[in-house]
Image: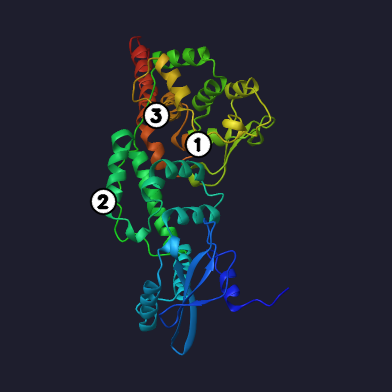
Amino acid sequence: MGKRSKADSIIENDNSAAIHATKRSKTIYPGVYFIRGIVSGQTKPEPIYYIRYRRDSRQIEEKVGSKSIDDMTPARANNIRSERIKGSQPSNKERRETIKAQKQAQVNIWTVDKIWQEYKDTNPKIKGIIFDESRYRKHIMNSLGKKELRDIEPRDIDLIRNKLLKSKSQATTKNVLELIRRISNFAVKRHLCPGLNHTIHMPKVNNIRTEFLNEEELGRLWASINQDTNIQAANLMKLALLTGMRRGELFKLRWKDIDFKRGFILIKDPKGGPNVVIPLNDASRMVLDNHPRDSSPYVFPGRNGNQRTDINHQVNRIKKRARLPKDFRPLHGLRHTYASLLASSGKVDMYVLQKLLTHKSPFMTQRYAHLHDKALMSASSLIGDIVSKVSNHDVID
């Protein structure tokens, strides 16, 4: 191989430079020269201009452009050289270093999307992550995902809140806003970046709502369930009524969590609490004995055998056929009906009902206390009937 010239070396180290180059040619301007080469997209050789100058005791030599692509001329190249010498323009190397630093800084920017990914990677098994992922993608990602937390203004949160309240419940709105706050708190706790610079005001949610089906409504619902062709939705609703299990607990229920031999169901992480066991009653056993079972570990699997995340369409169809009230929530309402029926029977005390419902505190169970009290009042009134009957007979001293 022949000896390479300095010009050849310069050309080869520049991606946009000529493939073939000739020797240097001087111009009328000191420190400005050109070579003739073929630049990208061209077929004929043309002038490619370079400048040489000293700055901070360093000799710098760099390309400033070609005739066809950059409309470069000797005069323009000389002006660029003058600006470089004065330091009013960075050299190509300095510009590349600046761009590199900017890209590196971009990598270190913690956007909401990036924080959310870090949150999931750090907490892969956190309770409710499937539902949080759905909330994030539907309601947060498009509006806040590319922003830094410090750039999120109260107005951004207000837009999300108002949009949700137009079509979603206050509870759903609160869950989405709570997720945004949790993401911010996570970033601060992990020292990733500063958090939100304002407080998110949560909508007030009244969760003390008891839904109860009377005997006629319950009869219509049971008939509607048995008529439905979707066995997953039908049996899931039956189990909700017969066990009082929560919607999420039914979605997470695996076959291995059911002990048919000893007669119990293991509920994992009920409302964030410790695992609990509830009885497998005969009616629930019958439903599960006749329920289809495939390769999925879940009793009520979703798409591709994975954990189910939604069944609203199917259960609402059953609800509509049964002509139930519009505000009756098919699954949560059946849990309330289960509790109400037991409380009003007078045969189950509040402590036992609390355990069956897996309430961590008796406070939530107290919503059914009035039904229990009515049953006790009814039982107590029996003494009046007994005494009344006795008083109608003569008492012999």
- Outermost residue to the right: 1
Q: How many marks?
A: 3
Q: Indicate whether 314 appears above or below 146.
A: above
Spatial separation of the CA atoms under disc 3 and disc 2: 48 Å
* Mark 2, secondary structure of its residue: helix
1 vs 3, front mark: 1
- Asked whether the beta carbons under mark 1 and mark 3 sit within 8 Å of each other, the answer is no
Q: Which mark is residue 372?
A: 3
Residue underneath mark 2: 155
Q: Amino acid at mark 1?
A: Gly
Q: Amino acid at mark 2?
A: Arg
Quadrant into which the N terminus falls: bottom right
Quadrant into which the C terminus falls: top left
Looking at the picture, how far across and down is residue 100, in whole percent? 48, 69
Q: Is residue 109 visible?
A: no
Q: Which mark is residue 373?
A: none
Q: Which mark is residue 248?
A: 1
- Frontmost residue, 204 versus 75: 75
Residue plotted at (55% across, 22% down): 235
Q: Amino acid at mark 3?
A: His
* Mark 3, secondary structure of its residue: helix
3 vs 2, front mark: 2
Q: Is residue 104 visible?
A: yes
| Label 2, residues with CA under 10 Å away: few <14, some 14-19, many ≥20 | few
Q: Earlier in the sequence, mark 1 or mark 3?
A: 1
Looking at the picture, how far across and down is residue 154, in whole percent? 27, 53
* Mark 1, secondary structure of its residue: helix
Q: Earlier in the sequence, mark 3 or mark 2?
A: 2
- Outermost residue to the bottom: 57
Spatial separation of the CA atoms under disc 1 and disc 2: 33 Å
- Which picture quadrant has residue 151? bottom left
Q: Earlier in the sequence, mark 1 or mark 2?
A: 2
